[in-house]
Image (spheres, grey):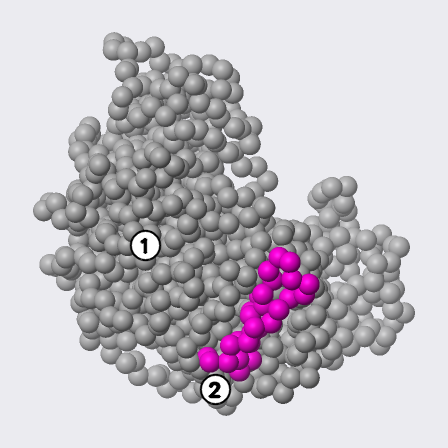
Amino acid sequence: MSQPGIPASGGVPTSLQAQNGAASASGSPYTNGPVQNALMSSQVSVSQGYNSQLSGSYPHPIPAKTLNPVSEQPNYGDSQTVSPLSNYQGPGRTINRPPVASNPVTGSLHSGPVPRMPLPTSQNPAATPMPSGSFLRGANIPPPLNWQYNYPSTGSQTNRCPRASSQPTLSGNTNSTSHQYVSSGDPSLQNNFIKSGITSNTNNGSMVVHNSYDEIEGGGFLATPQLTNKNPTMSRSVGYSYPSLPPGYQNTAPPSTAGMPPSSLNYPSGPQAFTQAPFGASHLTASMSGLSLHPEGLRVVNLLQERNMLPSTPLQPPVPNLHEDIQKLNCNPELFRCTLTSIPQTQALLNKAKLPLGLLLHPFKDLVQLPVVTSSTIVRCRSCRTYINPFVSFLDQRRWKCNLCYRVNDVPEEFMYNPLTRVYGEPHRRPEVQNATIEFMAPSEYMLRPPQPPVYLFVFDVSHNAVETGYLNSVCQSLLDNLDLLPGNTRTKIGFITFDSTIHFYSLQEGLSQPQMLIVSDIEDVFIPMPENLLVNLNESKELVQDLLKTLPQMFTKTLETQSALGPALQAAFKLMSPTGGRMTVFQTQLPTLGVGALKPREEPNQRSSAKEIHLTPSTDFYKKLALDCSGQQVAVDLFLLSGQYSDLASLGCISRYSAGSVYYYPSYHHQHNPVQVQKLQKELQRYLTRKIGFEAVMRIRCTKGLSIHTFHGNFFVRSTDLLSLPNVNPDAGYAVQMSVEESLTDTQLVSFQSALLYTSSKGERRIRVHTLCLPVVSTLNEVFLGADVQAISGLLANMAVDRSVTASLSDARDALVNAVIDSLSAYRSSVLSNQQPGLMVPFSLRLFPLFVLALLKQKSFQTGTNARLDERIFAMCQVKNQPLVYLMLTTHPSLYRVDNLSDEGALNINDRTIPQPPLLQLSVEKLSRDGAFLMDAGSVLMLWVGKNCGQNFLSQVLGVQNYALIPQTMTDLPELDTPESARTIAFISWLRDQRPFFPILYVIRDESPMKANFLQNMVEDRTESALSYYEFLLHIQQQVNK
């Protein structure tokens, strides 16, 4: 039996247009030739050099390296820019696009020479010559030093490129059994699960096995090729809003209609009574024009006169200019926000504004309230596969119109019933249509294989260097403390590997009196001894696991092994986990020196401060290739680097970046010399081990017809044009995408964006978390500027700047950041302001844009003139790419508070604790005073600077010392004193710490403390030896804007 739209021969599905909204004219997807069995949509496969046959009985081929069909360069899933465009798209994740536009892409945003930021006299202003074509394979055009946000229109009718099919040829045994764990990643890996449409004899029944996540999330089993009801005048009406339903709502299906396919439902003919009052276009316009915009929104600010624009309370994201009934249903901006809350009608208007268009997501964030729906029918658009959401419109009780592709769909019978109110005929009151964030329990057709068990493998460096740091004591103790809190169920599996110049496995077979150590010394050809006893059921072998964790720290105390065979250890771990997938946690303390993946020192300390010739790119592709193999087998790798020396994080970090893992970095970790790092590691490990986790996940972002996504940022692998592969997803990871307006949006007044995250929970449930965001479309430049979200813009620019640093140079990235400000403010001055006044005139929405960009230039990722370690800079760049926006902004522009006069005025009351709320201060020394105490929250660190003449009250009541001289040099904790001042200060610091997943160390700083330099380094508005003050920066921007 063949599936609808999929030929039995395994070719390109005919249902591509259904999955993508529309088909290309010729009916064939955008590819450069026939697609064979390959990773992504590249053509030629070459062998990768791994032993593809795993030891034991796990015959899993390894994903092969593929060649870029355009440039014949090896492609390991990194950015693919098919046509050489002169606009910048970043190295990380640019999707394959056809070489289409015959008209050339517009040139650089500046005509003439690119203005550079003036350098203080202490720095050499000579620029690094740019290697030609360094950011586009095969291109010979030098990259412009500023970003262009425009993207050439493909002229297609789709809101995304149709995906190339990747159907594997039928191989292996077609009789698959349900208990086998086989790869569910790249289709070429599936030799046990069979091609869609072939039925396997499982449990004496027939089942259809889906072989590609692309098809599962895209929903090929329901997709239909034809596109009906294409309204010529896309006049968009939005459903009326109703009171929200309580969270945790579990929906049950009426027994009579459970499992009925939508097409077989018999709808009664004739007109249906329907009471919903839809907003017609005229109604919407009228209601919008009546909205009172924030009076300050239209204000023009002269930054040279009004420099103190920082609000005294945390900056809130702008509220989209939508009717209140729509806005109150909108997605929380902490989960999903856009750089522009008013979407320009055309790409020309977007180009004119010179602002980047993109989305910032925090899709798996821990939520206090999350409606969960259990239903045998998940209602989705039959054309573009959008999940039903609050912004669709119901034409009547029986039909709803998709808000992304405008197709009219039937309402399934089951959806007519609302179990909460027990009323039939109210589909628009269901929770799916009342909540912009919702989670579905996915039925079996959303699975490629039975949900995998939670699998946790820990890989420890036990070389002499590692033992010296003493990290094993902390990590093993944390694991012992949190073993029962690991997310999972009765199927949870755990395993351990240690390595130095050899690899050590630990058999934890039930029945052994103690763990058995197995040593593999052949690191050139790693094999797995006794594979069935190395990853064991945690419940069955808990005592053995506890024994091992208690003895591990002592086992290697006398070791003389100084070598580190990290590469072979990772290969061994990958082979061990391939059959199931799971999470690999790697602890490393030095540069790998033996076997595959061995690295050489590249850092030159005398070049740390310059923006030239620093090694931001990997020195080998071993870690990236291995990460892609891991991704294909649903394995994510998290790297904990605890090192005092250079460890080439630029190379090592690839193992986490492309497998959707995370990097943790503890410079100069030592259990005795650096006790605060020990505290930080323990706190962060506790969060890491116990937080929620999603396995074998994929995420897709859809947007309204006319908009298109072209570049992705974050830790993942782009599996097809728009499907992100996330072997693990965690609640602390953020993502960003860049977008363009491919077709004019003149026929619609609202656009929507939807992210869908399909994952397996630690309890073995397949779930789909959906977020939908709705924004207005505008036709004037003033309205575009009015809705600009300056924090989201800064966050997206930071992601783009990391890519630019890696592909071009650090100085290029810095220039591009400065030019982003110059370009947008020039556009505002020339196209919006009617009278040209002197000064630096900015719209109120962008009043903090120059400040945030200056803060980025001084952030560890992009700063020059400091002696920052290369690994620390790379780690800061990893954080930019992987952190949700709220944490990124805090590390970029820290918060400064005066804390020696905290009061209960305006305080929050949380769980019977009173949390003072002191006002935010500007980051300038002129805001400090010697008779006060000031707390700086820089995200990963808290610094409490105490002035020389600080009041005796604060010293004794909060710090517990009698005078200033008695403050210890290395004070990192506040004593808990029985005073109201102490209680307030500790409550405030605890509250700040509780808001983030990482643990910021507190340093108490005196005037002569060595940490004072770090404190002053974060004073963004002040001049340093190598960077301008805020006022000087504004003068420079003004000079360029007024040219």
Q: In the image, is 17 to the left or to the right of 549?
A: left
Per the image, the residue denoted by label 2 is 601
Query: At numbered mark 1, what does the secondary structure look like: helix, strand or loop?
Result: loop
Which stretch is magenta?
496-523
Check disc 1 and give the amino acid type.
Gln
The extreme front residue here reads 511
Q: Is residue 403 above or below residue 458?
A: above
Q: How many residues crowd around disc 2 within 10 Å: few (fewer than 14), some, or many (20 or more)?
A: few
Is residue 325 visible in the rendered image? The answer is: no
Q: How many residues crowd around disc 1 within 10 Å: few (fewer than 14), some, or many (20 or more)?
A: many
Which corner quadrant of the image does residue 35 belong to? bottom left
Q: Quadrant of the N terminus?
A: top left
Check disc 2 and give the amino acid type.
Pro
Q: Nearer the viewer, residue 184 or 311?
A: 184
Query: At numbered mark 2, what does the secondary structure look like: helix, strand or loop?
Result: loop
Residue under the point 53% across and 82% down? 501
Q: Quadrant of the C terminus?
A: bottom left
Residue under the point 60% across and 77% down? 462
How far across and how far down the image is residue 845, in percent? 45, 51
Residue under the point 28% across and 34% down? 222
Residue under the point 35% across and 72% down? 50
How far across and how far down the image is residue 169, in percent? 22, 53
How far across and how far down the image is residue 751, in percent? 33, 39
Q: Is residue 768 above or below residue 801?
A: above
- Residue 510 magenta-highlighted: yes
Q: Is residue 764 above or below residue 394?
A: below
Which numbered disc, 1 or 2, marks the residue that appears first in the sequence?
1
- Residue 459 magenta-highlighted: no
Q: Is residue 402 above or below residue 674?
A: above
How far across and how far down the image is residue 579, in percent? 43, 57
Per the image, the residue denoted by label 1 is 190
